[in-house]
C-alpha cells in the first residue's frame, strides 16, 4: 500500500447530542510523521472528536480517513495501526498489569515484546499490581504502554497530562518523545496544557464550542499573529478595526489588538483610520494567542463591531 | 484473541457462575439428605437412587435457570457498569468477536446446566426398573425449556441495552411471570379453558419471545457504536 | 537548558541563545559535537523539528557546522567572529573611499586603479617588514 498523503483526514465532522452540537463541521488534517496539538477549553469538543476518530462514537455527519483508510468501513484494520490513550483508563480493574498486557497482546499483529518490556521498565510499573490499585499517573503510563507496544503509526492522546504530577508527566512525555523522534509516528494529542503543546507540536488546531478556529503550523501561527498596542488620543475610541483582528480591548487610552499578518501597511492604515498617538508591535506566546482566540470567539463579530461603533458614536 | 475474550467474560460473570455451581451442587446435597432419600448413602436401593437423582436433577435445572438468567443479565451490562467496555471499544476486536465470546460463554453454560440436570433425570429414568420414576418434584422439559429461553433471552437483550446489571437481571426474572400473566389474561378473554392448551400457548409465546430477544439483543449490540 | 514556553521569544530562538551561551561558557569546545537532535529533544522535551530549526540557525550564524551523518560540531567561532568584524570595518572604509571619489567625479575605472596601486604598495611594505 502506498503511503497516504495524510495520516488523518477529517472532513465536515459533526456530532449532535439531542439539540446541542458538540462538534460542528470540523476539518483536520495531519501529515504523516508530524505532531498535531489540539487545543481548546473544557467542553470545546476535543474529546468527542477524538472518540469519533477512534470509532467509539458515530458521527452525525462527515468523513474520517485514517492512514489512508475510511473509518466507516475499515475500522478493524485502522485499530491495528493506531494507539489510543483515553482521558481515563477504564481497563478491567481486576486484571493485573501483566494480565492486561497478555489480554491485549494477541489482538495486535505487530506487538513488540521488547518494546513492551522496555516501557514497563522505564515506567516502573510492577507487573503483578492490580489495575484497580494503580494511581492516576500509573494508569496513564499503563495506557501509554498499551498504546505504544504495538508500534502504532498513529498515536492519539486525549488530555494525557491532566491530573498527573510533574514526575509522572515527565515519564509520560519521555515515552511519547521517542515516537516523535522516530519521525515516522504521527501524533495527535488534545490538551489545555499550552506549555507542552508549544514544546511538542508541529501543528496546532484551536477548538472552541465545537468548531476549529484555526489550524496551522505552530511557528507560522506564532509569526503571523502579533499584539498591537496603540495609545489613543484623549477622549477618542477606535474607529476602524483592522482586518484580521481576532481580539481587541480598550483600557483607558491603551487599545490592545491581536492581529494577523501585521506589516507596515497595516500599521500605517491603522494610524490613518484611527486617532492614535503611538503604536508598538509585540510577539505573542502560544499561551497568550490561545487566550485571545478564545476571548475573541466569545464575542461574536457583529457585536464586536457594533460595540466599537457605538462607543465611537458616543464620543 | 478469542480465548482472551472468553477468559475475560468468564471472569466478568464469575458471580452468576459461582452461584449457579453452588446452587446445583446444593440441590444434589439437599436432596440426598432429605427424609426418605437419605437412604442413598446407606446402600439404598436403585429405586431410591433414581428418585433422588430425578428430584435433584429437576431442582438443579430450576436453579440453573435462575443462575443463567443472572449470567445473561450480567454479561454485557457489567462491562458498561464499570466502563471497561470503553477500554474494549478501542482495542482491535470487532463487535462480532466480542459478541461471539459472550455467546460462547452463555451457550456453554446452558449446555453444561442441561447436561447436569437433564443427565441426572435421564440417568434416573434409565436406572429405574420400568424406566419411569415418579418424584414429588419433577419437571417436564417441554414446560421448563420455554421458561429458560424467555428468561435468558430477555436478560441477554436487557443486558445489551442497560448500563447496570440489576435491571437486566430483574427483567430476566420478571419475563416469564409477566408473560404467563399475559397469556392467562388472553386465554381468559378468548376463552381457552383447557390446561394443556394453555401450557402449549405459553410455551410457544415464551420460546418466540425469548428467541426474538436473543437475536434482537445481539443485533442491537453489534450495531451500537457507543461502548 | 531551560525552555520557557510562555516566553514570547520562540522556543527555537531560546535554544539558539542558550546553546551559544553554553559554547561561550565552555560547555562545548571547538570541534566538539553538540548533543544529537534526538537526544536534546528528549532531554528538554521539545519537538525534534524545533531543535533542527535551532541547529540550522546556529549553522547559518557560523557557530556550528553540520557534518553529514556525524552531527553538528562547534566551529572556531572566535577567529570567525574576529574575521567577520575586520571585514566589516574594511568594507566600511572601502565604501567611504568609493563614495568620496564618486561624489568628486572620479571615474569607477580610476577608483579601481587607485585600489590596485594602494594594495600593491601595502603588500610591498608588508614584505619589506618581514
Image: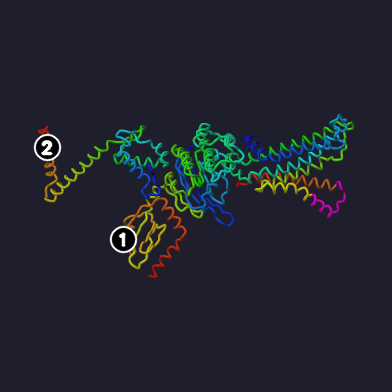
Residue B183 part of the magenta-drawn span: yes
Label 1 Cα neighbours within 10 Å, binned few <14 / some 14-19 / many ≥20: few
Q: Quadrant of the C terminus of chain A?
A: bottom left
Q: Is residue C64 left or right of residue A43?
A: left
Rendering colour mode: rainbow
The answer to which quarter of the image holds residue C113 is top left
Looking at this view, is B78 or C69 the one in front? Answer: B78
Q: Residue at x 80, y 34 (%)?
A: B119
For residue B125, say whether it is visible. Answer: no
Say which mark, if any, is on residue A309: none
Looking at this view, is A175 or B222 the one in front? Answer: A175
The answer to which quarter of the image holds residue B76 is top right
Please state the chain letter of the residue tagged with numbered disc 1 in the rendered image: A
Q: Residue at x 87, y 30 (%)?
A: B44
Query: Dot 1 lies on which element?
Result: strand
Residue B197 part of the magenta-drawn span: no
Vertical comparison of A288 with C70: above or below: below
**Residue B123, percent from left and from top:** 82, 32
**Residue C111, percent from left and from top:** 13, 44
Query: Dot 2 lies on which element?
Result: helix
> Disc 1 marks which residue?
A278
Label 2 Cα neighbours within 10 Å, binned few <14 / some 14-19 / many ≥20: few
Please state the chain letter of the residue tagged with numbered disc 2 in the rendered image: C
| Co-location on one chain, circles 2 and 1 | no
Count the marks: how many? 2
Extent of the magenta region: B180-196
**For the stretch drawn in magenta, what is the main secondary structure?**
helix
**Residue B5, percent from left and from top:** 63, 37
For residue C130, say whether it is visible. Answer: yes
Q: Is residue A270 left or right of residue B107?
A: left
Say which mark, if any, is on residue C120: 2
- How far is the residue under mark 2 from the one under mark 1? 55 Å
Amino acid at each position: 500500500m502506498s503511503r497516504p498523503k495524510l495520516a488523518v483526514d477529517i472532513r465536515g465532522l459533526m456530532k449532535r447530542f439531542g439539540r446541542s452540537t458538540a462538534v460542528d463541521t470540523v476539518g483536520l488534517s495531519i501529515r504523516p510523521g508530524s505532531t498535531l496539538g489540539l487545543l481548546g477549553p473544557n467542553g470545546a469538543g476535543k474529546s468527542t472528536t477524538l472518540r469519533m476518530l477512534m470509532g467509539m462514537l458515530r458521527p452525525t455527519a462527515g468523513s474520517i480517513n485514517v492512514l489512508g483508510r475510511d473509518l466507516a468501513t475499515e475500522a478493524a484494520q485502522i485499530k491495528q495501526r493506531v494507539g489510543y490513550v483515553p482521558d481515563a483508563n477504564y481497563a478491567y480493574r481486576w486484571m493485573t498489569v501483566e494480565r492486561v498486557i497478555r489480554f491485549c497482546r494477541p489482538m495486535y499483529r505487530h506487538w513488540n515484546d521488547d518494546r513492551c518490556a522496555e516501557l514497563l521498565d522505564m515506567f516502573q510499573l510492577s507487573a503483578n499490581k492490580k489495575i484497580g490499585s494503580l494511581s492516576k499517573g500509573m494508569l496513564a503510563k499503563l495506557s501509554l504502554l498499551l498504546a505504544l507496544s504495538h508500534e502504532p503509526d498513529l498515536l492519539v492522546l486525549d488530555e494525557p497530562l491532566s491530573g498527573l504530577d510533574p514526575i509522572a508527566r515527565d515519564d509520560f512525555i519521555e515515552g511519547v518523545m521517542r515516537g516523535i523522534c522516530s519521525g515516522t509516528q504521527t501524533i495527535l494529542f488534545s490538551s489545555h496544557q499550552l506549555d507542552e503543546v508549544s514544546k511538542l507540536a508541529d501543528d496546532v488546531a484551536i477548538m472552541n464550542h465545537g468548531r476549529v478556529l484555526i489550524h496551522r503550523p505552530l511557528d507560522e501561527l506564532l509569526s503571523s499573529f502579533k499584539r498591537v498596542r496603540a495609545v489613543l488620543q484623549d477622549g477618542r475610541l477606535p474607529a476602524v478595526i483592522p482586518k484580521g483582528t481576532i481580539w481587541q480591548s480598550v483600557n483607558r487610552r491603551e487599545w490592545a489588538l491581536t492581529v494577523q499578518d501585521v506589516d507596515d501597511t497595516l500599521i500605517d492604515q491603522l494610524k490613518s483610520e484611527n486617532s492614535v498617538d503611538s503604536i508598538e508591535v509585540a510577539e505573542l506566546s502560544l499561551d497568550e494567542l490561545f487566550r485571545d482566540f478564545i476571548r475573541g470567539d466569545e464575542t461574536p463579530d457583529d457585536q464586536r463591531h457594533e460595540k466599537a461603533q457605538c462607543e465611537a458614536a458616543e464620543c | 484473541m478469542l480465548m482472551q475474550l472468553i477468559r475475560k467474560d468468564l471472569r466478568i460473570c464469575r458471580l452468576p457462575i459461582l452461584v449457579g455451581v453452588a446452587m446445583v451442587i446444593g440441590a444434589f446435597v439437599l436432596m440426598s439428605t432429605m427424609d426418605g432419600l437419605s437412604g442413598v448413602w446407606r446402600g439404598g436401593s436403585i429405586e431410591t437412587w433414581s428418585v433422588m437423582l430425578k428430584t435433584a436433577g429437576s431442582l438443579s435445572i430450576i436453579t440453573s435457570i435462575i443462575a443463567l438468567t443472572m449470567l445473561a443479565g450480567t454479561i454485557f451490562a457489567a462491562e458498561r457498569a464499570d466502563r471497561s467496555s470503553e477500554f474494549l471499544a478501542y482495542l482491535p476486536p470487532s463487535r462480532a468477536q466480542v459478541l461471539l465470546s459472550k455467546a460462547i460463554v452463555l451457550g456453554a453454560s446452558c449446555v453444561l446446566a442441561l447436561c447436569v440436570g437433564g443427565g441426572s433425570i435421564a440417568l434416573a429414568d434409565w436406572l429405574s426398573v420400568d424406566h419411569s420414576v415418579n418424584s414429588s418434584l419433577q419437571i417436564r422439559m417441554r414446560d421448563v425449556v420455554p421458561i429458560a429461553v424467555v428468561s435468558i433471552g430477555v436478560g441477554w437483550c436487557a443486558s445489551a441495552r442497560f448500563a447496570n446489571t440489576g435491571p437486566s437481571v430483574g427483567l430476566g426474572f420478571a419475563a416469564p411471570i409477566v408473560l404467563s400473566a399475559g397469556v392467562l389474561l388472553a386465554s381468559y378473554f378468548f376463552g381457552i379453558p383447557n390446561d394443556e392448551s394453555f401450557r402449549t400457548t405459553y410455551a410457544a409465546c415464551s420460546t418466540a419471545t425469548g428467541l426474538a430477544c436473543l437475536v434482537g439483543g445481539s443485533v442491537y449490540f453489534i450495531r451500537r457504536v457507543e461502548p | 537548558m531551560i525552555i520557557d514556553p510562555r516566553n514570547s521569544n520562540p522556543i527555537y530562538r531560546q535554544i539558539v541563545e542558550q546553546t551559544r551561551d553554553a559554547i561561550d561558557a565552555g560547555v562545548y569546545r571547538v570541534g566538539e559535537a553538540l548533543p544529537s537532535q534526538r537526544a536534546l529533544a528528549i532531554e528538554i522535551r521539545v519537538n525534534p523539528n524545533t531543535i533542527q530549526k535551532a541547529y540550522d540557525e546556529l549553522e547559518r550564524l557560523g557557530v556550528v557546522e553540520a557534518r553529514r551523518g556525524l552531527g553538528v560540531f562547534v566551529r572556531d567561532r572566535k577567529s570567525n567572529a574576529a574575521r567577520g568584524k575586520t571585514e566589516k570595518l574594511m568594507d566600511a572604509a572601502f565604501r567611504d573611499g568609493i563614495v568620496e571619489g564618486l561624489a568628486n567625479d572620479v571615474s569607477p575605472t580610476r577608483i579601481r586603479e587607485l585600489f590596485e596601486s594602494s594594495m600593491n604598495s601595502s603588500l610591498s611594505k608588508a614584505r619589506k617588514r618581514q
